Image (cartoon, rainbow, N blue to C red):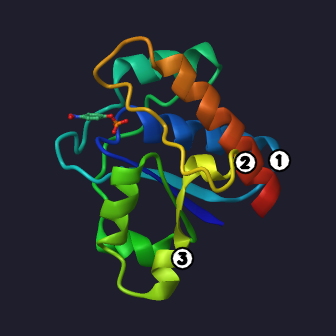
């Protein structure tokens, strides 16, 4: 499986999602490729937000080696599953899709844990208090993803 996590900046939510899913896949000896991207270009080459790094560390996960990357059209070909954190990400990913097969790969990540509800992972960038909540939501969804696709 090749799984891509996508948010807006690729510094808060999708780096956490990448770190959590990588940890769970490793625990189950799954040889998956797991990466993350932002739909925006502001944070290309940057480390994850310090608050995401701290939240991951609190949970025993090191995401300090991640660097911001912007989503490219070729990512839709390369990856099998592409998870959007929110509705805006979802719509922006779909704009890059060039076939029905590519469109089918794109999913709202919380539909794995709360099916058909199209709930969003709230953007914690502008507040300090959202990071633990984001971690909990992503942890629940990633647990289901490893079990569903292993
Ligand atoms: P993320 O959060 O999409 O979870 O990485 C954001 C990071 C940066 C910005 C917005 C959201 N920004 O406007 O720079």
Ligand 1 within 8 angstroms of badge 2 C-beta: no
For residue 62, above or below residue 55: below
| Residue count near mark 1 (Cα–Cα under 10 Å), binned few <14, some 14–19, many ≥20 | few
Looking at the rendering, the quadrant in which ligand 1 lies is top left
Residue closest to the far left: 42
Residue nearest the observer in this picture, 113 or 4? 113
Q: Secondary structure at mark 1?
A: loop
Q: Is mark 3 within 8 Å of ligand 1?
A: no
Q: To which residue does mark 2 refer?
A: 25
Q: Which residue, given by chain and number where applicable, does mark 3 sit on? A: 104
Q: Do the residues under discs 2 and 1 have CB atoms within 8 angstroms?
A: yes
Please tell me which of labels 3 and 1 falls first in the chain: 1
Return the mark for residue 90: none
The vertical placement of 40 against 77, above or below, is: above
Quick one: label 3, few (<14), some, or many (20+) residues within 10 Å? Answer: few
Q: Answer yes or no: do the residues labelled 2 and 3 have beta carbons within 8 Å?
A: no
Measure how far apart labels 2 and 3 are at the Cα level: 23 Å
Position of 25 relative to 58 (above/below): below
**Image location (x, y in percent) of residue 36:** 44, 50
Where residue 52 appears, as percent x and y from the top left, is: 44, 23
**Residue 64: quadrant of the picture:** top left
Q: Which residue is mark 1?
A: 28
At 37% from the left edge and 12% from the top edge, which residue is drawn? Answer: 128
Q: From where the camera sits, is residue 61 visible?
A: yes
CA separation, marks 2 and 1?
5 Å
Q: Is residue 69 left or right of residue 109?
A: left
């Amino acid at each position: 499986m090749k799984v891509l996590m996508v948010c807006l900046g690729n510094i808060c939510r999708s780096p956490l999602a990448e770190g959590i899913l990588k940890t769970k896949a490793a625990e189950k000896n799954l040889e998956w490729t797991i990466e993350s991207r932002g739909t925006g270009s502001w944070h290309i080459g940057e480390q994850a937000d310090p608050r995401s790094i701290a939240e991951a560390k609190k949970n025993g996960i090191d995401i300090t080696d991640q660097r911001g990357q912007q989503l490219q059209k070729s990512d839709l070909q390369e990856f099998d599953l592409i998870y959007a954190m929110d509705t805006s990400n979802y719509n922006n990913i779909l704009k890059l899709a060039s076939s029905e097969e590519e469109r089918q790969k794109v999913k709202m990540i919380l539909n794995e844990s709360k099916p058909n509800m199209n709930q969003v992972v709230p953007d914690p960038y502008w507040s300090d208090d959202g990071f633990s909540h984001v971690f909990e939501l992503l942890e629940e969804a990633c647990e289901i993803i490893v079990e569903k696709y292993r």
